[in-house]
Image: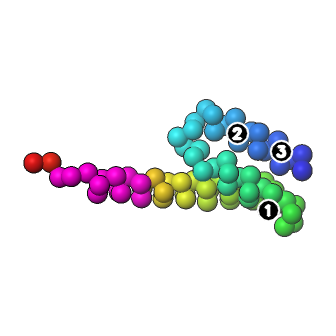
């Protein structure tokens, strides 16, 4: 449990320095770290995978939001 806490704190510190790249990573890392820890004491592997999945989902959502915002704008004349 201590490793998960230390990893979570480290990821939080990294997120503050580069929030644009880390969007989705913190939540995914926390969930993945806990799941990996309980699934077989592989918390760090779970945290890394959770971070990657979280970033992927955040980027996908951002693309969808940008597409929706672009379609909501009326065409310029």
> With respect to residue 6, does 66 lie above or below?
below
Labels 2 and 1 touching (C-beta < 8 A): no
Gap between marks 3 and 2 measured at Cα: 10 Å
The residue drawn where x is 21% and y is 52% is 74
User: Which residue is the site of mark 2?
Assistant: 12
Where residue 2 appears, x then y in whole percent?
89, 46
> With respect to residue 36, does 69 lie above or below?
above
Give the class, few, some or many, for how many residues have Cα within 10 Å of label 3's Cα (few <14, many ≥20).
Answer: few
- The mark nearer the N terminus, 1 or 3, is 3
Give the class, few, some or many, for how many residues have Cα within 10 Å of label 1's Cα (few <14, many ≥20).
Answer: some
Residue 48 included in the magenta stretch of the image: no
Which numbered tag is attached to residue 5? 3
The residue drawn where x is 83% and y is 44% is 5
Residue 28 or residue 77, whichever sits in front? 77
Q: Quadrant of residue 72?
A: bottom left
Magenta highlight: main SS: helix
Residue stretch rendered in magenta on the structure? 64-75
Q: Which residue of the protein is positioned furthest toward the right in this rendering?
A: 1
The residue drawn where x is 34% and y is 52% is 69
Secondary structure of the residue carrying tag 3 is helix
Gap between marks 1 and 3 measured at Cα: 13 Å
Q: Which residue of the protein is positioned furthest toward the bottom in this rendering?
A: 39
Give the class, few, some or many, for how many residues have Cα within 10 Å of label 2's Cα (few <14, many ≥20).
Answer: some
Where residue 44 appears, x then y in whole percent?
78, 54
Q: Does residue 36 appear left or right of residue 27 in this picture? A: right
User: Which residue is the site of mark 1?
Assistant: 35
Q: Which residue of the protein is positioned furthest toward the top in this rendering?
A: 17
């Amino acid at each position: 449990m201590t490793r998960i806490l230390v990893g979570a704190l480290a990821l939080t510190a990294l997120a503050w320095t580069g929030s644009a790249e880390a969007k989705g990573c913190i939540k995914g890392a926390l969930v993945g770290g806990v799941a990996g820890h309980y699934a077989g004491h592989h918390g760090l592997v779970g945290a890394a995978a959770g971070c990657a999945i979280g970033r992927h989902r955040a980027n996908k959502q951002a693309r969808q939001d940008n597409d929706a915002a672009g379609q909501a704008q009326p065409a310029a004349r």
